[in-house]
Amino acid sequence: MTTYRVIQLIQNAISYIVLSVLAVALGFPLFWIIITSVKDRREVFNQFWPSQIDLSNFERVWAEMNLPNHLGNSLYVTGLHVAIVVVTATLAGYAFARLTFPRRDTIFYAFILAMMIPGQAVLIPMFQYLKNLGLLNTHEGLALSMTGGAIAFAIFLMRAFFKSLPGELGDAAKIDGCTEWGVFRHIYLPLARPGIATVIIFQFMGTWNEFMFSTTFINTPNMKTIQPALYQVVGRYSIDYTALSAGLLLAIMPILIVFLVLQRQFIKGLTAGAFKG
């Protein structure tokens, strides 16, 4: 066995060890949530493995916390937000990538700057803005409040994706008499499905897990989304970890479903714009 081969085997072994350690470190919190969700409350910190599988925690969370209502609220807010962002970012991304108009790059970089503004900085102005519009304590107002930075990031992704597509396709369609809208609708939009899937997954995860705006802009208990609703389990002097773990697992399910449905397009979308920006 040559020296190069030995060095390569050592490097591969080190890589697998590091990746295995990272996988365990990143996966352990989820594993702990799973086993805690089926424990008795007295066993949470007294023993690692549950003495028996107890599914009553899921039934308790589902009924006592009115979880279906909060899941429905989250689905509505997330669906509305994702629809607005996907439509806006797809059209704007195509315009920034394929159209020529005055100050195109300046406007695009202005959107990029919006990505650098943290949500905490706009919390109070957004609260006042929604109040003046009469959208405070409404699901529509909550969905719209999260579109600013989200649209900027989505436009960034879609622009990179449209720039990675061959420009000759659009030129050929225009020669055949197709309008600009027709080129977008019939040529580039079908090819943009991986990019759209990437935006959907990112926006769905970000909106579904959002806590700060949801807690601040919604104060009616029955109108709260899933994350603020789960926070109600955290008491002043104690925390019901079994109920919290069961609720978190139920809250994760929609994200897993969306990712499993769109995962192939998601991987294509992440790599499509890697070499063009």
Image (cartoon, helix red, strand yellow):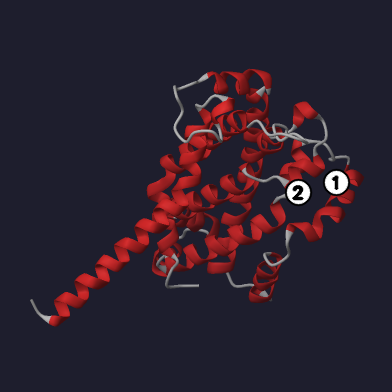
Please tell me in which quadrant of the rendered image residue 151 appears.
bottom right
Cα–Cα span, label 2 and label 1: 8 Å
Instruction: Name the residue at 89% across, 44% down.
Output: 131
Q: Nearer the viewer, residue 187 or 204?
A: 204
Q: Residues within 10 Å of mark 2 (few under 14, many from 20)?
A: many
251 left or right of 212 in image: left
42 left or right of 260 in image: right
Three-letter code, disc 2: Ser
- Mark 1 residue element: helix
Quadrant location, the N terminus: bottom left
In this rendering, does residue 5 appear at all? yes
Three-letter code, disc 1: Leu
194 left or right of 110 in image: left
Which residue in the protein does label 2 denote?
145
Position of 19 relative to 40 (above/below)? below
Q: Which x, y percent locates residue 22?
A: 42, 58
Q: Which x, y percent locates residue 196?
A: 50, 51
Q: Nearer the viewer, residue 19 or 99?
A: 19
Instruction: Name the residue at 40% across, 67% down.
Output: 166
Instruction: Name the residue at 74% across, 42% down.
Output: 214
Instruction: Name the residue at 54% across, 62% down.
Output: 157
Q: Are marks 2 and 1 in contact (CB under 8 Å)?
A: yes
Please tell me in which quadrant of the rendered image residue 66 appears.
top right
Which residue in the protein does label 1 denote?
130
Q: Which x, y percent locates residue 238?
A: 71, 34
